[in-house]
């Protein structure tokens, strides 16, 4: 049911794609993975612009434009299907609200990675009402780094708190204990937390830029 609804949403988002082009899009950007966006225009010239327009609202646009201007390579993008109870809002403080049973959410959750100078990756989720840009150290080939960070995020269902909370919070607070166990036992989650450099809050573009410069130069 969920997969069918999400597939229908993809067709609604990109009505200009014929069946073959839609299949190529799904093959080029499989659900749950991050892929370079450079190949989208080869599927259809409108696709990169439609993806941006449908996944980036006016509130997010200034932040993504700035990240795009700072990128040293083409960005990566990805999406996953949601049930309406997944990928909750990012908290303003160090406490994650529980999802509300029956709450409606967009059936697709989108994100972008921007390669920056000094081997740094910026991650921006443009759906799910995220309120910060996350920065990670990229040690090794770019595609491998993006894939590893995506796998780590997927292990915690793209929740933000398991990324940025210190070990003490994960260990001491019962609601986060499963993440503490995962961080010890799962190499991709352990690598995600080790690569995390910090986050820039979307309080205002000026304040966000100050944080970006501090974290990524």
Image: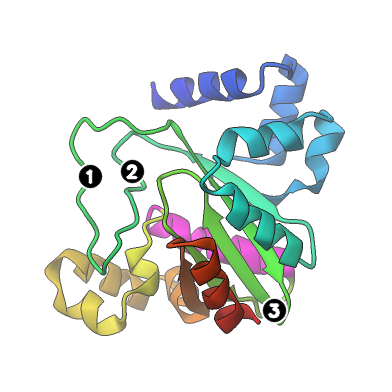
Q: In this view, does 53 lie to the left or right of 91?
A: right
Looking at the image, is 53 positioned above or below residue 188? above
x and y percent of residue 23 in the render? 70, 25
Q: Which range is magenta?
A: 142-157
Q: Mark 3 points at which residue?
A: 119
Q: Is residue 154 magenta?
A: yes
The secondary structure type at the circle numbered 3 is loop
Question: Can you tell which mark lies on residue 99?
Answer: 1
Total numbered labels placed on residues in the image: 3
| Mark 1 crowdedness (10 Å alpha carbons): few <14, some 14-19, many ≥20 | few
Q: Is residue 60 left or right of residue 183?
A: right
Circle 1 SS class = loop
Q: Do the residues labelled 1 and 2 touch (CB within 8 Å)?
A: yes
- The answer for how far apart the CA atoms under marks 1 and 2 are is 7 Å
Assign a secondary structure to mark 2: loop
| Distance in Å between CA atoms under marks 1 and 3 | 35 Å
| Residue 20 location, quadrant | top right
The secondary structure making up most of the magenta span is: helix
Sequence-wise, the earlier of marks 2 and 3 is: 2
- Residue depicted at x 57% and y 71%: 209
Task: Identify which residue is drawn at 63% across, 59% down.
Answer: 113
Question: Which picture quadrant has residue 142?
Answer: bottom right
Q: How crowded is mark 2: few (under 14 residues within 10 Å), some or many (20 or more)?
A: some
Q: Mark 2 points at which residue?
A: 86
Q: Quadrant of the N terminus?
A: top left
Whole-angstrom CA distance, mark 2 to mark 3, is 30 Å
């Amino acid at each position: 049911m969920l997969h069918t609804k999400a597939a229908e949403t993809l067709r609604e988002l990109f009505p200009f794609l014929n069946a073959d082009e839609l299949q190529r899009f799904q093959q080029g950007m499989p659900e749950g993975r991050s892929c370079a966006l450079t190949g989208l225009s080869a599927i259809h010239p409108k696709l990169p612009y439609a993806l941006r327009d449908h996944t980036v609202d006016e509130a997010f646009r200034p932040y993504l434009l700035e990240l795009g201007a700072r990128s040293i390579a083409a960005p990566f993008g990805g999406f996953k299907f949601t049930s309406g109870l997944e990928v909750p809002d990012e908290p303003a403080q160090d406490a994650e609200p529980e999802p509300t049973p029956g709450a409606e959410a967009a059936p697709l959750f989108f994100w972008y990675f921007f390669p920056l100078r000094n081997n740094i990756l910026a991650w921006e989720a443009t759906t799910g009402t995220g309120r910060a840009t996350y920065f990670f150290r990229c040690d090794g080939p770019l595609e491998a780094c993006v894939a590893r960070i995506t796998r780590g995020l997927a292990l915690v269902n793209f929740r933000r708190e398991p990324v940025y909370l210190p070990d003490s919070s994960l260990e001491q607070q019962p609601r986060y204990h499963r993440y503490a166990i995962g961080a010890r036992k799962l190499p991709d989650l352990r690598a995600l937390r080790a690569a995390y450099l910090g986050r820039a809050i979307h309080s205002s573009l000026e304040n966000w830029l100050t944080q970006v410069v501090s974290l990524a130069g």
